[in-house]
Amino acid sequence: MEKERYTFKCWNCEKTYTLLREITKEQTLTVACPYCSAEAVVDLEPFLKKVKPTLRGEEPPQDLGEELDLPEIFPTRKKE
């Protein structure tokens, strides 16, 4: 996958910022705010959506998998 620019909202100072990141189906992503230097975690699990069949009249395969449905601005939380 290629790196893309994503927007994040800092949990600490609440400013938004963009970073180049390669996002996969991993469960979490660690970022640091360029304004206040607070480290943050982005949970990707809420953005995983089940793939639904698009064909009519045919029996769908058992497991179609999951795909990421990413928001415009990622909320972050404090890194523990």
Image: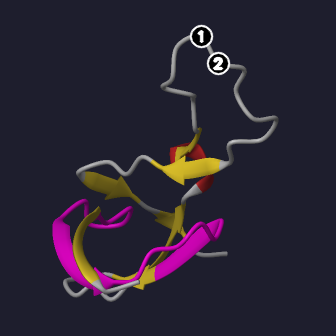
Q: Say which mark, if any, is on residue 58.
A: 2
At horizontal 42% and vertical 82% (from top left) the residue drawn is: 31
Do the CB atoms of the residues marked 1 and 2 lie less than 8 Å apart?
A: yes
Q: Say which mark, if any, is on residue 42.
A: none
Q: Residues within 10 Å of mark 1 (few under 14, many from 20)?
A: few
Viewer-proximal residue among 8 and 57: 57
Percent across and percent down for residue 28 are 60, 70
Does residue 59 appear to the left or right of 37 in the view shown? right
Q: CA distance from mark 1 to mark 2?
A: 4 Å
Identify the magenta region.
9-30
Percent across and percent down for residue 54 are 48, 26
Placement of the N terminus among the 4 image quadrants = bottom left
Q: Quadrant of residue 60?
A: top right
Asked if 66 appears above or below 27 in the picture, the reply is above
Placement of the C terminus among the 4 image quadrants = bottom right
Q: Residues within 10 Å of mark 2 (few under 14, many from 20)?
A: few
Residue holding disc 1: 57
Percent across and percent down for residue 9 are 28, 61
- Note whether residue 41 is visible: yes
At horizontal 38% and vertical 62% (from top left) the residue drawn is: 11
As drawn, the residue found furthest toward the front would be 57
Colouring chosen for the image of the structure: secondary structure
Tag 1: residue type? Gly
Does residue 42 appear to the left or right of 37 in the view shown? right
Q: Is residue 27 magenta?
A: yes
Describe the element under mark 1 as helix, strand or loop: loop
Does residue 9 appear to the left or right of 66 in the view shown? left
Tag 2: residue type? Glu
At horizontal 34% and vertical 83% (from top left) the residue drawn is: 21
Viewer-proximal residue among 65 and 73: 65
